[in-house]
Image (cartoon, coloured by chain):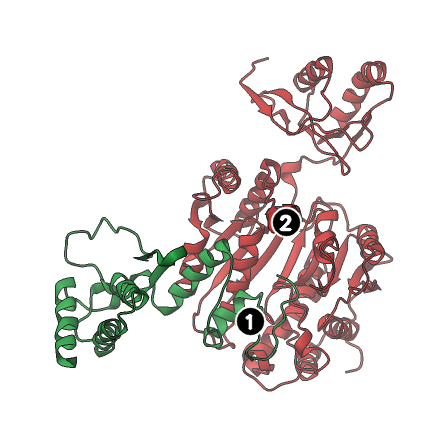
Amino acid sequence: PAGASRSTPSNTPTSCGCHGCMVQDPTQFDVLVMPNLYGDILSDLCAGLIGGLGVTPSGNIGANGVAIFESVHGTAPDIAGLDMANPTALLLSAVMMLRHMGLHDHGNKIQTACFDTIRDKKVLTKDLGGNSKCSEFTAEICRRIQDLD
Amino acid sequence: MHLHERRQIQTDATTALPPAIALFLVTLCEAATDDFRVCRCANATSRQTVNTTRSLRRHVHVTALLPCARSDRFLIKMASHGAALSVSKMISPFWGGRLGNTMKVFGTTLTSHRNKSLHTGENIPPPAKYGGRHTVTLIPGDGIGPELLNHVREVFRFSCVPVDFEVVHVNSDVQTEEDINNAITAIRRNGVALKGNIETKHTMPPSVKSRNNLLRTSLDLYANVMHCQSLPGVQTRHKNIDIMIIRENTEGEYSSLEHESVSGVVESLKIITRNNSLRIADYAFRLAREKGRRRVTAVHKANIMKLGDGLFLQCCREVASGYPDITFDSMIVDNTTMQLVSKPQQFDVMVMPNLYGNVVSNVCAGLVGGPGLVPGANYGRDYAVFETATRNTGKSIAGRNIANPTAMLLASCMMLDHLQLYDHASSIRNAVLTTMNETRLHTADIGGQGTTSEVVQSVMRVIQSKGQLTSEL
């Protein structure tokens, strides 16, 4: 929208009306709150910035602590049952769930193991550029968790 | 006469159309010998439900019948002068008897609407041209607008461009609409305008509408066109982007229709009409064909807004069927933004309603290097207004000589093309692109250290070096 204005970073909430900012320098943003439609658009935009829907977790939080955590990607019927899918999105959503339940240790451990596996680049699923199976990727994460213990 | 299709135009009826009139109009359609189009009057306050028949053989098409602000008048616009004359002869006695007032009928263009070329209208010279010089309305706006437009004037003066600017100031601090109405009148007079963004202050009461929006809707500048191209001299993450974005500019979420019937509960109306959707889709396809583009993508959220965006999508599909040489597909807006940031090269021409257009054009501007680089144009049937594509006021960088003049200079080149001053347009455009890509004199927003005036000086030097007539540097 016209007339986008941003004050210098501080603890006061600022408003930004420019999606170009997100594209040019997304690191300037921390927490964003917005109505439904903008959230739909912006969450997919940001997912695109970090590697796509295959790695993006999400959670839907309601009143009284009721919550549903889900990956945002679709059902991918073309690769279903072939041990090819990338479990990262759903796994990180599960981590969000553990944190929501107060099981922070478990959550952190799984997240660390997952990130390390991806950073290492040795066992990656096809969508991330590797040629490992889903089960191999998962086994690698489990191995790292055991090592962390 | 074959009645191929009975089509009902459902609208909000406040006064019922006498059945005899409705029948008369059906007869009128069948009797017209040329393309016949019934269009709305600028001050329409209510619409009627009309059963219309469409004759495919004669391409007679009734889009809408609307009474003017005076309930005893209707405006019928003919595509052909001949039809207008024959119809007016038929209408006067009948109408006069029925309603007590003669109906105003006038012929408009001499050429068929379909053959209209996009940017210059029909083959009629621009309105405000006299003695070889054009008059263009200039609205400085707020923030960086005034200084950038001063640079445009500087470059024009230097290049001896035969354009005189009529400057109209619009004060964004006052609540009255006098200023913006003066600006609109000036644009009606001159037909073309170049503008900076007019700030919409958030501190004003909600009844104060956005001045830019008022301008667009009053002049019915229904198409906002933005051409995003990667520039070789600008460092960006993605390369080889070449996307044209056509954004519906007058309705959708920008209809400024909101109400709070219950305190704390606001309802906003998003308006999507068949007419405007067909119009913008038609514009997109014609532009695509004119520019030799292969693919048009409609951006929507019809899975959620089934009626609104559903109608838009349906209209796009209808228009697409008339352009078999151009591929048409559609994409949901959230997926679109994701694809834009990961694989923007897949897009060619995109058409979409107002809000998605705002989002997508900002994203694309960011992809090619920022708001300082991309020019934008707003086209209506009779008027054209040129500005920067992302419509930023740039308050924080105003008056510091660091703003990027590229967008505004390229917008002025688009304006020169519209005025058919092609040589001047090319000369200035080439100079700007040379400065950007070869000399690589960049302002801060694209990672350089040049000032606005340095860039402008460089542009003028390049123009001079090409050997054309210029004034003193």
Mark 2 closeness class: few <14, some 14–19, many ≥20 residues within 10 Å: few
Would residue B106 appear left or right of A8 to someone viewing this image? Answer: right
Q: Amino acid at mark 1?
A: Gly
Across and down, in percent, residue A135 comes to 13, 63
Identified by mark 2, the residue type is Ser
Q: Chain ID for label 1? A: B
Query: Can residue B230 be seen by looking at this rendering?
Result: no
The quadrant of the picture occupied by the N terminus of chain A is bottom right
Coordinates of residue B135 in the picture (x, y in percent): 82, 59
Colour of chain B as rendered: red
Along the horizontal axis of the image, is A66 left or right of B309?
Answer: left
Q: Look at the image and tell me whether residue A28 can be seen.
A: yes
In this figure, which residue is indicated by the disc labeled 1?
B370
Q: Which quadrant of the figure contains the C terminus of chain A?
A: bottom left
Palette colour of chain A: green
**Residue drawn at x 38%, y 57% as measured from the top left:** A64
Alpha-carbon distance for marks 1 and 2?
40 Å
Report the chain holding disc 2: B
On screen, residue B70 above or below B372? above
Q: Earlier in the sequence, mark 1 or mark 2?
A: 2
Percent x, y for residue B254? 63, 50
At x 66%, y 81%, the residue is B402
